Image: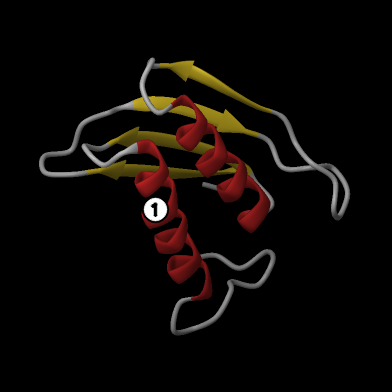
Amino acid sequence: MDNAVLALFYEGSMKIGTLAVSTSGLREGSTGTSSVLLGGKYLIAARALAEKVAASFSKMGIVSLNTQLTEGEALRVYSSLLDKVRSGPMGPPEAGSRG
């Protein structure tokens, strides 16, 4: 997607969980806005992950979180996973690159 990053965090079979959306800040270092659209479990973790996706990729972040972990543990584990994906073996993607 050119304008957003969709991240699905789940365990076992793929299921939609608490759904959060965040926009990236308009300027370097500014914060965007975020909101939970659906769900009632793990509200803070889903929102924090959406904000992290938006800030990391400078695009709208859409996150679904469906897990059996505690909220704090889920945030720690999935945030670490996002860091690994972002840094990857090839490094961060260049702006405007496709692939």
Q: Nearer the viewer, residue 12 or 94?
A: 12
Q: Is the residue marked by circle 1 packed among few (<14), some (14-19), or many (20+) residues within 10 Å? A: some
Q: Can you identify the residue that label 1 sits on?
A: 78
At which x and y percent is residue 32? 75, 36
Q: Secondary structure beneath disc 1?
A: helix
Q: To which quarter of the image does residue 35 belong?
A: top right
| Residue 96 left/right relative to 89 | right
> Residue at image x 18%, y 38%?
14
Q: Exactly how many numbered labels are in the figure? A: 1
> Residue at image x 59%, y 49%?
52
Q: Is residue 96 above or below residue 6?
A: below
Residue 3 in view (yes/no): no
Q: Nearer the viewer, residue 62 or 11?
A: 11
| Residue 6 left/right relative to 53 | left
Q: Nearer the viewer, residue 24 or 12?
A: 12
> Residue at image x 32%, y 44%?
9
Q: To which quarter of the image does residue 84 belong?
A: bottom left
| Residue 49 left/right relative to 72 | right
Residue 62 in view (yes/no): yes
